[in-house]
Amino acid sequence: GQNIDQPTEMTATEGAIVQINCTYQTSGFNGLFWYQQHAGEAPTFLSYNVLDGLEEKGRFSSFLSRSKGYSYLLLKELQMKDSASYLCAVRPQGSRGGGADGLTFGKGTHLIIQP
Amino acid sequence: NAGVTQTPKFRVLKTGQSMTLLCAQDMNHEYMYWYRQDPGMGLRLIHYSVGEGTTAKGEVPDGYNVSRLKKQNFLLGLESAAPSQTSVYFCASSYFPRGRTYEQYFGPGTRLTVT
């Protein structure tokens, strides 16, 4: 089975740094994704980790530890527009290979940015 | 490029009615997916397709059927709608080039209410 856990809600201050954690237990692993979703909109891709370590992309960084089943998304220099839900998703090892079997999502973390 | 588009954006159905949701992508992607998103549940995979003429069941396929007659289109059908199918439906597409991430591109969503 698949289980992905992330906090339901977090609050942070504009200009600060926030870390959103994600833990997973899946029957296989073929990569971990982070998506951003503003209210009423579609999810948009932020980052992808398949090997252990840190991936940095501008103000956003994502970390993966496969042995611990753990990832985090780090947001720096927070802006009001960063208020959104952040979705952690795992691609399990698909029967077809190549990752065709879709993603398993956590319930999302609603991030509130305060002035 | 329009990316991934979905039709309609909103719909209200009565219990027992049928309807088809249309997803179209102009990125020549091989893989397409249907998810539903409910409050507190996260995104869940309904059905997916790895190519024209092929479909497969996801996590929550009951009550839905799909077809992929053309590469660019993926249709989701509800034969007899039930209130439990009230949700926001997202279509996504992806491809798997070598050395690239496998992110899924999401459409804007269809908000369906079944009364």
Image (cartoon, rainbow, N blue to C red):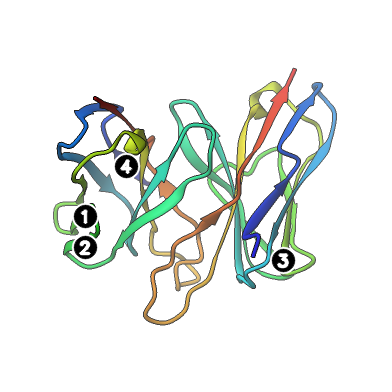
Under circle 2, the secondary element is: strand
Kindly identify which chain the residue marked by label 1 belongs to: A
Q: In the visual, does B21 lie left or right of A103?
A: right
Mark 4 — residue? A4
**Which disc, if any, is residue A61?**
1
Q: In the visual, does B22 lie left or right of A40?
A: right
Kindly identify which chain the residue marked by label 4 belongs to: A
Q: In the visual, does B4 lie left or right of A55?
A: right
What crowding class fits label 4: few (fewer than 14 Cα within 10 Å), some (14-19), or many (20 or more)? Answer: some
Alpha carbons under labels 1 and 2: distance apart: 6 Å
Alpha carbons under labels 3 and 1: distance apart: 33 Å
Please, what is the three-letter code of the amino acid marked with disc 1? Ser
Mark 2 — residue? A55
What crowding class fits label 2: few (fewer than 14 Cα within 10 Å), some (14-19), or many (20 or more)? Answer: some
Mark 3 — residue? B72
Q: Residue furthest bottom?
A: B98
Can residue A75 be seen in the rendering of this structure?
A: yes
- Residue B27: image quadrant is bottom right
Q: In the rendered structure, are the residues bearing label 3 and label 1 in contact, judged by CB atoms less than 8 Å apart?
A: no
Kindly identify which chain the residue marked by label 2 belongs to: A
Under circle 3, the secondary element is: loop
- Percent across and percent down for residue B31 are 59, 66
Q: Earlier in the sequence, mark 2 or mark 4?
A: 4
Alpha carbons under labels 2 and 3: distance apart: 32 Å
